[in-house]
Amino acid sequence: MTSLAWRTSLAAAAAIALALMLYILLRPHAVPEILACPLQIEQRAMHPGMVWIPGGTFEMGDDVYPEEAPRRLVAVDGFWMDRTEVTNADFAWFVRETNYVTAAERQSKAGSAVFVMPSGNADLSTAASWWRYVEGANWKHPGGPETSIEGRDQFPVVALTYEDIAAYAKWKGRTLPSETQWEWAARAGAKHAPEHEQPKDANTWQGVFPLINTDEDGFAGLAPVGCFKPNAFGLYDMIGNVWEWTTDEFKNHAPKARVIKGGSYLCAPNYCMRYRAAARQPQEEDLGTSHVGFRTILIAPGP
Ligand SMILES: [Ca+2]
Ligand SMILES: [Ca+2]
């Protein structure tokens, strides 16, 4: 090989090495997705995973949306409540032990409602532009058959009907919270409705719903449970992440619906200021969706 040929191949090798080095240094760093947040469960507690919610009297309701009114004074007895939303791991344990089959898994064409971010030219006057009924969407495949909860043990379980969550609560020897119990627990001792601003310590939607999600809180979609600061009672994610079922029927609603509380990761100031304890919404009993979860309570003596 001539010296010119040597020099040419050396230069080529150096160019390739330089390009490789630049690629390694400058390639965009993928931000790893957060799959779990550190949560210390006190195993010696009277009811592990639950906190005691003391009884009290508070002014329930608010006036941001008509369905929250009127403000009225109510009294609540103490009870135990799950510190977090029920997770995929919790629900998987129940299914393993009981072989329970959820409503969305019972028929071949069954499914759940799934949030899908619309394109810019979608009709934004109707929620049908961002909700799809997806066949095969269920708690194990919350976004549809091609999605999975693998590695997502600590995410809140979704796509369940009221019947499904009642079965889980019964198996645990517990019940579900009433709206009053839930709102009192979310207030965490505040006698009146606190400020109406979008909370900083909760998984909600920053940006213009449903088109722009700036995910300043670190999560564009669902978050694992317990990633945000707990409230004064020690409860995580009462506000935001997933809405939570309560036992109260949402009156004058067809088909039959229950009250859900707390708002979800889809609540934004321009569309749904329901990231508040007093906020409420109807949820059809027999429809699972990708933004509604739950937690249980236990009526038992306090600590
Ligand atoms: Ca968020
Ligand atoms: Ca929640």
Image: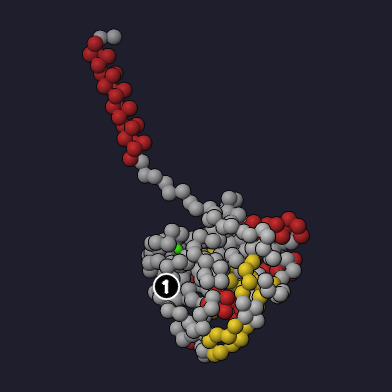
- Residue 242 in view in this figure: no
Rendered residue at 42%/46% (across/down): 30
Q: Is residue 169 visible?
A: yes
* Tag 1: amino acid: Gln
In this rendered view, identify the residue nearer to me: 155 or 287. Answer: 155
In the displayed structure, 99 sits above or below 198; it is: above
Crowd class of label 1 (few under 14; some 14 to 19; many from 20; radius 10 Å)? some
Quadrant (top left/top right/bottom left/bottom right) for the N terminus? top left
The answer to whether residue 128 is left or right of residue 40 is left
Q: How is the image coloured?
A: secondary structure
Q: Nearer the viewer, residue 205 or 160?
A: 205
Give coordinates of residue 228: x percent, y percent.
Answer: 49, 63
In the image, farthest residue toward the right: 98
Furthest residue toward front:
303
Instruction: Estimate the x, y position of residue 274 in percent, counting from the top left.
Output: 48, 76
- Residue furthest to the left: 4
Where does the image place residue 252, in percent across and percent down from the top left? 60, 87
Q: Residue at x 39, y 45 (%)?
A: 29
Residue 297 in the figure: left or right of residue 8 = right
Look at the numbered disc 1 and say if its residue's Cβ is closer than 8 Å to ligand 1.
no
Which quadrant holds residue 8?
Answer: top left
Query: Would residue 234 appear left or right of 266 to someone viewing this image?
Result: right
User: Residue placed at 69% from the left, 65% from the top?
Assistant: 46
Q: Residue at x 36, y 36 (%)?
A: 24
Secondary structure category for the residue under label 1: loop
Figure check: 172 above or below 261: above
Image quadrant where one finds the C terminus:
bottom right
Q: Is residue 290 left or right of residue 171?
A: left
The residue singled out by tag 1 in the image is 198
Instruction: Give the total of numbered labels.
Output: 1
Report which quarter residue 96 is drawn in: bottom right
